[in-house]
Image: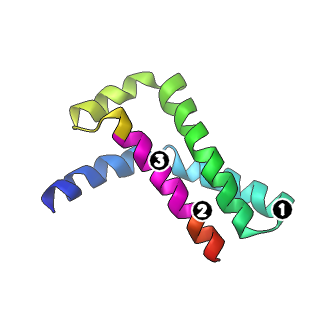
């Protein structure tokens, strides 16, 4: 349990650069053009990995070292992004 809490804070810090802008753009596009929450979820499902790629693979590549020093690999960070995108997608489908 202690290990899980140890990794939650860096993952939250990592997702703060990805989730809010991707969610805002998803809500804006989904409700403006498609007028449904399921569209918001689908757009977020597609946009979150692209936003992750742009932020951490292209623009701020050096920030991976910070997460490596905390014990988080690139695979763990990608899985966290995809997991968050899938959870938001299914929550939007339920709404």
Secondary structure beneath dot 2 equals helix
Give me the residue at 47% from left, 47% from top: 81
Name the quarter where the N terminus is drawn.
bottom left
Q: Main secondary structure of the magenta part?
A: helix
Residue bearing mark 1: 34
Image position, residue 17 (x, y; %): 49, 43
Query: Furthest-left residue in view?
Result: 2
Residue bearing mark 2: 89
User: Is residue 79 shown in magenta?
Assistant: yes
Using the image as rendered, state which of residue 72 and residue 63 is in the foreground. Answer: 72
Mark with earlier residue (2, 1): 1
Query: Furthest-bottom residue in view?
Result: 95
Secondary structure beneath dot 1 equals helix
For marks 2 and 1, give the one nearer the viewer: 2
Image position, residue 50 (x, y; %): 60, 38
- Give me the disc on residue 81: 3
Rounded to the nearest whole Å, what is the CA distance between mark 2 and mark 3?
Answer: 12 Å
Image position, residue 53 (x, y; %): 54, 32
């Amino acid at each position: 349990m202690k290990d899980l809490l140890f990794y939650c804070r860096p993952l939250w810090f990592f997702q703060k650069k990805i989730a809010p802008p991707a969610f805002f753009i998803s809500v804006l596009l989904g409700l403006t053009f498609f007028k449904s929450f399921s569209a918001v979820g689908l757009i977020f499902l597609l946009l979150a990995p692209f936003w992750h790629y742009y932020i951490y693979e292209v623009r701020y590549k050096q920030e991976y070292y910070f997460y490596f020093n905390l014990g988080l690999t690139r695979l763990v960070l990608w899985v966290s992004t995809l997991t968050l995108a899938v959870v938001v997608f299914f929550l939007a489908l339920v709404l």
